[in-house]
Image (cartoon, rainbow, N blue to C red):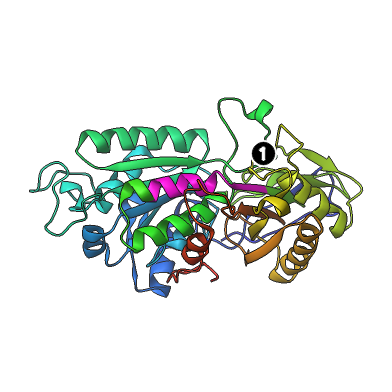
């Protein structure tokens, strides 16, 4: 069992291990097993590391199902968001490694209206390919969502192709919301996925729970994440749970990194000396709402949001692992004040550890531009807020 250790004094490297764990090989399995003990409404398929609603067999017959998947180490994403009103199932890979195509395929088959004509192993059942059950929804099927990372996208592509060939109805949407990666740098690959997909999933899963079909659920999911952006800041780098003492690269003293990725990828800028919280928040909010920055103006605000009626936003403040609620609350208050000074109104917000990077110290702001007053939006603002407020029963969402 490994105990966190750090040499003194800290320099460009420190020697440390991860938190208390049994073995690195069983870290994710142990966590998911424990979650089912805490929440009896969840079931766990250990073979493919799939956590799902215990009532999935009946739920999938009358509702669109939604799957979130990622590598481990980002908990509570996605396992903490499985339950009524939110995800139908979550698939986890090893720490910072995508689930395999076989894992994702098994989850798709499990979530199909008739169980995909098979079981969680992907074997054909008596119903044949895509066999359904009586009473299933006309526009039934499964939406699969992940962050925009190469391994996740490739493995999901293989799984979805195989599932569609087997007769399954499935839509796949990778989400990139990191504004630290500009258009020039992102190129054809696009932006990294951070916590923006949780905003989209909160709304899309509520629609699915209310009985909407796959086409509409996928359309709304894509629309919402197209109006979302995220910027994070890290106070240190992250160590893997390898169970041994290792040299961990760290930031230089008195330095933070703006825009560091969820796996410790290089960010937009290292800042030293460390700015005041107020100055840091001003910079982060500017990256999210500044429409004159053509490389990073991803959220489609108008040039004058207050005048054009698209100035209402939802704010999500995420801990990257070890940042406390107290610290998040202070940064949240600063963000609300800064947004108000720029003409924006925060009408909903939530905070906490939602998409972590093991025990990284840092936080991120995710901003969702609510539908404007003009016609032509996929959602009306009133409906968007009703879906955001829709009750859920899962381990990690703070309503």
Residue at 54% x, 59% y: name it. 381
Query: Looking at the image, which residue is at 64% across and 61% down?
Result: 3
Q: Position of residue 147 (x, y in %)?
A: 51, 43
In the displayed structure image, the side of residue 224 where residue 238 appears, left or right: right
* Quadrant location of the N terminus in the rendered image: bottom right
Task: Look at the image and tell me whether residue 93 can be seen.
Answer: no
Main SS, magenta residues: helix
Residue at the spot 25% in from the left edge and 49% down from the top edge: 139
Residue hosting label 1? 265
Q: Is residue 265 magenta?
A: no
Determine the residue located farthest toward the left in the rendered image: 126
Please state if 309 lies on the left or on the right of 14 as rendered.
Answer: left
Q: Is residue 268 above or below residue 320?
A: above
- The magenta stretch is 217-230
> Element under label 1?
loop
Task: Name the spot of residue 329 as percent of width and height, x first.
Answer: 73, 69
The location of residue 230, given as percent across then percent down, is: 65, 48
Q: In the rendered view, would you say 179 is above or below 20?
A: above
Q: To which quarter of the image does residue 260 belong?
A: top right
Is residue 375 visible to us here?
yes
The residue shown at (87%, 54%) is 279
Question: Residue 309's spot in the image, x, y percent?
Answer: 65, 54
Q: Is residue 220 magenta?
A: yes
Depth check, front residue: 175 or 34:
175
Image position of 341 with respect to 158: above or below: below
């Amino acid at each position: 069992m490994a105990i966190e250790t750090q040499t003194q004094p800290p320099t460009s490297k420190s020697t440390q291990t991860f938190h208390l764990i049994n073995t690195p090989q069983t870290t994710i399995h142990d966590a998911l097993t424990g979650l089912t003990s805490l929440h009896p409404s969840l079931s766990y398929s250990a073979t493919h590391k799939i956590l799902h609603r215990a009532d999935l067999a009946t739920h999938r017959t009358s509702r669109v199902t939604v799957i979130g998947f990622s590598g481990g180490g980002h908990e509570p994403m996605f396992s903490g968001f499985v339950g009524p009103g939110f995800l139908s199932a979550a698939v986890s890979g090893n720490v910072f490694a995508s689930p395999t195509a076989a894992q994702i395929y098994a989850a798709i088959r499990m979530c199909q209206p008739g169980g995909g004509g098979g079981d969680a192993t992907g074997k054909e059942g008596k119903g044949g390919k895509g066999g359904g059950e009586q009473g299933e929804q006309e526009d039934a099927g499964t939406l699969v969502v992940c962050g925009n990372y190469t391994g996740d996208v490739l493995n999901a592509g293989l799984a979805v192709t195989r599932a569609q060939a087997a007769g399954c109805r499935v839509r796949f949407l990778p989400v990139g919301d990191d504004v630290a990666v500009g258009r020039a740098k992102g190129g054809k690959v696009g932006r990294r996925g951070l916590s923006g997909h949780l905003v989209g999933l909160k709304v899309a899963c509520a629609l699915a729970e209310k009985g909407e079909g796959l086409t509409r659920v996928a359309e709304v999911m894509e629309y919402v994440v197209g109006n979302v952006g995220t910027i994070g800041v890290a106070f240190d780098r992250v160590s893997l749970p390898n169970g041994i003492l290792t040299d961990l690269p760290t930031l230089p003293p008195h330095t933070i990194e703006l825009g560091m990725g969820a796996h410790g990828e290089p960010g937009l800028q290292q800042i030293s000396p460390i700015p005041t919280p107020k100055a840091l928040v001003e910079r982060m909010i500017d990256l999210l709402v500044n429409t004159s920055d053509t490389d990073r103006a991803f959220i489609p605000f108008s040039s004058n949001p207050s005048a054009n009626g698209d100035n209402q936003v939802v704010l999500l403040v995420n801990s990257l692992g070890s940042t406390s609620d107290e610290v998040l609350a202070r940064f949240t208050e600063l963000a609300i004040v800064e947004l108000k000074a720029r003409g924006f109104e925060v009408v909903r917000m939530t905070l906490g550890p939602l998409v972590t990077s093991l025990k990284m110290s840092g936080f991120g702001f995710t901003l969702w531009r609510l539908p404007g007053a003009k016609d032509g939006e996929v959602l009306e603002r009133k409906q968007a807020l009703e879906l955001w407020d829709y009750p859920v029963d899962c381990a990690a969402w703070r309503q």
